[in-house]
Image: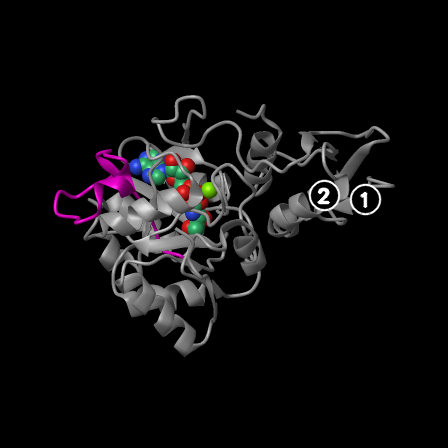
Amino acid sequence: MILITQDLMASDEGVARAAAILRAGGLVAMPTETVYGLAGDARNGTAVAQIFAAKARPTFNPLIAHVTGLEMAETLAVFDDRARAVAAALWPGALTLVLPLRSDAGLSPLVTAGLSTVAIRCPAHPVAQALLRAFGGPLAAPSANPSGRVSPTRADHVRAGLTGRIDAVLDGGPCTVGVESTILGLDGAPTLLRPGGVPLEALEAMLGPICMGGDAHKPNAPGQLASHYAPEAGVRLAVTAPQADEVWVGFGPGCKGAALSLSPGGDLIEAAAALFQTLRDADALAGPGGRIAFAPVPESGLGRAINDRLRRAAAPRN
Ligand code: TXA
Ligand code: MG
């Protein structure tokens, strides 16, 4: 079915219309500080099924439930003191917690892909918060891109990928963090399931050592499939001497002759915010069958999330 995708401004009226669409079981792309999310009513199985259909996402890959705050989160998952302390310190923000699902959570089983845990995030973006409050319940929201492709950090990216497949795009401007949330498993020993917008170092400072989890090759251990964030062009990593036919994307001051740069000054926060737009720009420059080469990015702070996304962009395609 082809839908007419409405463009909504992030005004009170735009948010009210978006909430009405969600209450009617429709899908709205909403801005968050990490990436745009494709939101639907997490308690409505038909709406959640339509999220999977719009993205062509495998249904064994569960979704994140977005909430207004800890109070709503505690209706969905079992929080212990440790989870409460982490949420109090880092919510709202770019952190998703995986916790035991409450039996009375009321979520569509499609959200959790039938698992006994649920992923929950309280986003900091004021428009996401306004929409969650206007809607008044949990919103399931994966990144608003066709499955496997580059995540959207601007409303235009959403339109390019999903026009005709969703009901509306709520335009909240460019995302400031630029990479998806960090996913922390807290249903046992603290486990990093996905590096993201909250650096691992910040979690270690609160929780001590954190296990490294997430197995990209075992899709229903969720996490992600190895090939993801894939542009059209081929991608090569940690390149200090690009080949003549490659579009070289620099990082830091040493990359003379690079066509593009994630951050000329070598700032990881700036690089994360620029990552997905730069991947799109490089893809356009490379052209059909072209190749992109990324300069090395340090594996610390937000560099961990940037390198994770770049490794998946470079992974062999299915
Ligand atoms: O920043 C973000 O997290 C964005 C914005 C929109 O909030 N959302 C996002 O959603 O990145 P998505 O669907 O692209 O990624 C969600 C990840 C998937 O890798 C999924 O496997 C994992 O969360 N996940 C969901 N539920 C899980 C669970 N119960 N256990 C382990 N991983 C889970
Ligand atoms: Mg995604």
Residue 257 is situated, as x and y percent measured from the top left of the image, at: 87, 41
Please, what secondary structure does the residue beneath circle 2 have? helix
Q: Is residue 182 visible?
A: no
At 58% across and 26% down in the image, what residue appears? 315
Region rendered in magenta? 99-123
The image quadrant that residue 259 belongs to is top right
- Disc on res. 259: 1
* Kind of residue sitting beneath label 2: Ala
Residue 126 is situated, as x and y percent measured from the top left of the image, at: 43, 67
Q: Residue at the left extreme? A: 104
Q: CA distance from mark 2 to mark 1?
A: 8 Å
- Disc on res. 282: 2
Is 148 magenta? The answer is no
Asked whether mark 2 and ligand 2 are closer than 8 Å, the reply comes as no
View quadrant of ligand 1: top left
* Kind of residue sitting beneath label 1: Ala
Residues 189 and 19: in front is 19
Residue 314 is situated, as x and y percent measured from the top left of the image, at: 62, 29
Residues 77 and 15: in front is 15
State the count of labels: 2
Residues 104 and 211: in front is 104
Q: Are marks 2 and 1 in contact (CB under 8 Å)?
A: yes
Q: Residue at the front extreme? A: 1
Residue 131 is situated, as x and y percent measured from the top left of the image, at: 36, 66
Looking at marks 2 and 1 on the same chain, the residue that comes earlier in the sequence is marked by: 1
In this picture, is 226 found above or below 42?
Answer: above
At 75% across and 29% down in the image, what residue appears? 239
- Disc on res. 250: none
In this picture, is 7 found above or below 46?
Answer: below
In this picture, is 177 found above or below 315?
Answer: below
Q: Residues within 10 Å of mark 1 (few under 14, many from 20)?
A: few
